[in-house]
Amino acid sequence: MSSFQYRGNRLYAEDVQIQEIADSVGTPCYIYSQTDIEQRWREFDTGFGSHPHLVCYAVKANSNLAILNLLARLGSGFDIVSIGELERVLAAGGDARKVVFSGVGKTESEIKRALEVDIYCFNVESETELYRIEKISSDMGKKAPISLRVNPDVSANTHPYIATGLEENKFGVPIDSASALFQYAAESPSLEIKGVDCHIGSQLVEMSPYLDALDRILALVDQLYTQDIELSHIDMGGGVGICYQSESTIPPQTFSAALTQKIKDSKLKILIEPGRAVVGNAGILLTRVEYLKKTPKKNFAIVDAAMNDLIRPSLYQAWQAVNPELVRTDEPIEYDVVGPVCETGDFLALNRHLSIRENDLLAIGGAGAYGFVMSSNYNSRPRAAEILVLENQYQIVRERENIQSLFANERTASFEIRSKKDSL
Ligand code: LLP
């Protein structure tokens, strides 16, 4: 059950009345529930039973240090895609030896740094990346731990921008060419084969694509066996969907248990990389209604959060819940909930029936994943504060940005203005 619930006609985050946070921290702000995050992570973890496993939280979903620190204390591993994410994990007390490094564009300096801190393995996404990692580890006198990300060519029923496991996507190597690359890696003195991985997409609500992908990977594992190549793990990536509206989703424990069921007779350790399903519904974006504007065609609730704070509705036409902090008995009216950014695409929700008045607070649901991390300063808007709640307490885990921070890294140039004639 979610920790964001009404008590009487007011919305609470765990045992904290949300209005209290708005009064002291201001809006817009992200609010996360520690209890919900702990629970979701533990559900994934316990689903594996006693089978060797590692839950590597996908840092990209929400990389706030407090959340990474919480997960590190639970014993989580981490899936990272940049040096920035690696440094966050380390700064938050995460264990480098539980880090897998995914991503199609790892730079030389990123690879070097990851080797320096001894991450668990690189999820290699192409042949040329394999050669690059080999060269760098050889120069450093090291053996780089690698897994090959294969593209199992299964179709996952999700938004095209977040489907990743098809042949036409940029991710991984085609599963048919994997055994030759593994053979190369096995013969290299600077590479150490750890496993094989895949990630077929995000916001998946069915188990079957995962099981299909796992079948294909197990066939590859058998093939590698005949080449005398033994893997120590299979990483099934992330992607478990959450309920934004009324989707029926795969419970985390069921997900882990179903994967385990298929490989329980092997010694292979299983890794997963869930992001959204750990933090997505553990967070809301709290915003205040600035104006209610009626036009002949539409009613707008103009709020103080915008597409720069939460881009999912604009970018993926994503539906996210809008829950008023105060439940009113006024007759509901249909609104588009929009921000102050100067774009028609700046909306958080369309055609919602709401009983609200100016100055009311609205909680946008499912905002714990791909919310703050995708925010920007567009329209020179300082980014929102982030708050973590546990039981009846809350702490600010990221201060609201201020005006100075908006252009602190900028400077004017010293070029002279040319005469009108020269500049033509
Ligand atoms: N592992 C890899 C290699 C990934 O690329 C991703 C997500 C994950 C794990 C975690 O997936 P999750 O469990 O969170 O679904 N911004 C989009 C989602 C992009 C997902 C990218 N990769 C959204 O807001 O829906």
Image: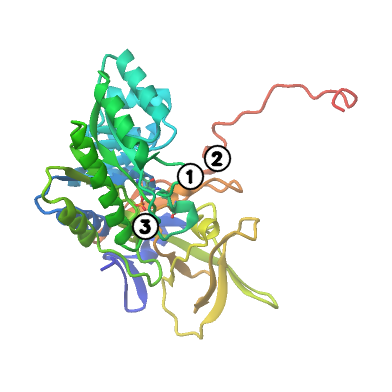
Q: Is residue 231 visible?
A: no
Q: Which residue is mark 3?
A: 31
Q: Position of residue 237 (x, y in %)?
A: 31, 47
Pointer 1 and pointer 2: residues touching (CB < 8 Å)?
A: yes
Q: How many marks?
A: 3
Residue at the outermost left position:
50
- Category of crowding for the residue at label 2, using alpha-carbon neighbours closer than 10 angstroms: few (below 14), some (14–19), many (at least 20): some
Q: In the picture, which quadrant includes the N terminus?
A: bottom left
Left or right: 366, with 144 as reference point = right
Pointer 3 and pointer 1: residues touching (CB < 8 Å)?
A: no
Q: Residue at x 55, y 43 (%)?
A: 403
Q: Position of residue 269 (x, y in %)?
A: 16, 43
Q: Residue at x 49, y 52 (%)?
A: 161
Q: Residue at x 51, y 60 (%)?
A: 313
Q: Which residue is mark 1?
A: 401
Label 1 residue SS: loop
Q: CA distance from mark 3 to mark 1?
A: 16 Å
- Which amino acid type is marked by label 1? Glu
Q: Quadrant of residue 5?
A: bottom left
Label 3 residue SS: strand
For marks 3 and 1 on the same chain, the one whose residue lies earlier in the sequence? 3
Pointer 2 and pointer 3: residues touching (CB < 8 Å)?
A: no
Residue at the outermost right position:
421
Q: CA distance from mark 2 to mark 3?
A: 22 Å
Label 2 residue SS: helix
Q: Of the numbered discs in the image, which one, if any, rests on residue 119?
A: none
- Which amino acid type is marked by label 3? Ile
Q: Of the numbered discs in the image, which one, if any, rests on residue 406?
A: 2
Q: Nearer the viewer, residue 49 or 89?
A: 49
- Which amino acid type is marked by label 2? Leu
Q: Position of residue 122 (x, y in %)?
A: 31, 32
